[in-house]
Image (spheres, helix red, strand yellow):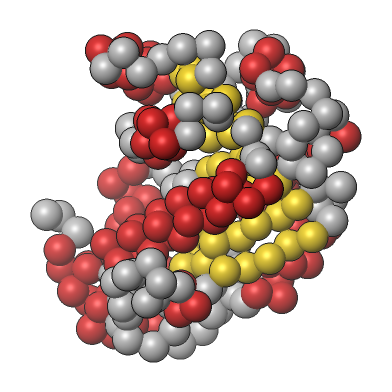
């Protein structure tokens, strides 16, 4: 409710709002993950900062062969674990574990969780949704480099995340950045936008060590996935980055 005025302003000035963006990114990411499972035989998924998203539960219901590991900070991971236990959903193939993206070693590191849960020699799909914009680009680059490095032990690993293409100047940019500032105050985080265009996305992820990068535009999936529309170009993009 508190975001309603900002939602109206964003929709009026930019042709889109938070609700539209959330649905666009979520449905595209689900579509891509399902495509890789069905078409490429992906069987290992690591979702980082999964919160209370039902993605892991839904995918395990449809694809029981999946090893799906959901992670978050310890408090949220425990809350999620209890909720899924109450549904009888957890097993040796569906786990909820604590993970801190900034820990490079120890039990809460991404590398340790992967070592404990996944089969070496087979790819992992690493997913973050709604995480990276709460940190600066400088914060995220080492984390992305570590995901790319997983490809050495898990060849073909790919990373799936969302980003936002926000120009550095203009009325739309000011409106979006004003809304981000309000969200930052509400969440006590440093909300930021990392890229102005798709070229910058590719450059940064290749610099992080990924072999291939693809950027998905909601406009290409609007009819196929029944995405909510926005006036003009969508600000959100979904990024697929494939490790060596």
Q: Is residue 149 above or below residue 164?
A: above
Q: Nearer the viewer, residue 137 or 202?
A: 202
Q: Which of the 4 image quadrants contains residue 119?
A: top right
Q: Nearer the viewer, residue 157 or 22?
A: 157
Q: Nearer the viewer, residue 75 or 19?
A: 19
Which residue is at 75% across, 57% downward? 205
Residue 74 horizontal/vertical position (percent): 45, 16
Residue 232 in view (yes/no) = yes
Residue 138 in view (yes/no) = no
Q: Is residue 12 above or below residue 35?
A: below
Which residue is at 55% across, 78% downward? 168
Q: Which of the 4 image quadrants contains residue 2?
A: bottom left
Q: Is residue 150 left or right of residue 138?
A: right
Residue 118 horizontal/vertical position (percent): 69, 22
Residue 13 horizontal/vertical position (percent): 29, 85
Q: Which of the 4 image quadrants contains residue 176?
A: bottom left
Q: Is residue 98 left or right of residue 22?
A: right
Which residue is at 63% across, 31% downward? 44
Residue 124 horizontal/vertical position (percent): 68, 36
Q: Is residue 129 left or right of residue 138?
A: left
Which residue is at 22% across, 68% downward? 7
Quadrant for the N terminus, please. Answer: bottom left
Q: Is residue 96 left or right of residue 5?
A: right
Report the number of discs: 0
Q: Is residue 200 above or below residue 137?
A: below
Residue extending farthest to the left is 1
């Amino acid at each position: 409710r508190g975001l309603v005025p900002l939602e109206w302003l964003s929709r009026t000035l930019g042709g889109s709002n938070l609700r539209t963006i959330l649905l666009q990114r979520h449905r595209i990411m689900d579509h891509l993950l399902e495509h890789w499972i069905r078409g490429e035989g992906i069987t290992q998924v690591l979702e980082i900062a999964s919160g209370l998203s039902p993605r892991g539960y839904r995918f395990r219901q449809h694809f029981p062969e999946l090893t799906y590991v959901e992670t978050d900070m310890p408090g949220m991971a425990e809350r999620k674990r209890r909720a899924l236990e109450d549904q009888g959903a957890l097993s040796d193939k569906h786990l909820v574990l604590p993970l801190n993206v900034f820990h490079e070693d120890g039990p809460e590191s991404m590398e340790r969780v992967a070592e404990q849960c996944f089969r070496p020699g087979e790819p992992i799909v690493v997913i973050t949704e709604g995480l990276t914009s709460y940190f600066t680009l400088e914060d995220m680059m080492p984390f992305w480099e570590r995901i790319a490095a997983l490809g050495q032990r898990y060849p073909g690993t790919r990373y799936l995340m969302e980003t936002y293409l926000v120009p550095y100047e203009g009325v739309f940019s000011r409106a979006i950045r004003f809304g981000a500032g309000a969200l930052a105050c509400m969440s006590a985080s440093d909300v930021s936008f990392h890229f102005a265009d798709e070229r910058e996305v590719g450059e940064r992820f290749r610099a992080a060590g990924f072999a291939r990068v693809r950027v998905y535009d909601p406009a290409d999936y609007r009819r196929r996935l029944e995405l909510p529309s926005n006036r003009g170009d969508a600000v959100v993009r979904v990024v697929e980055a494939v490790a060596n």
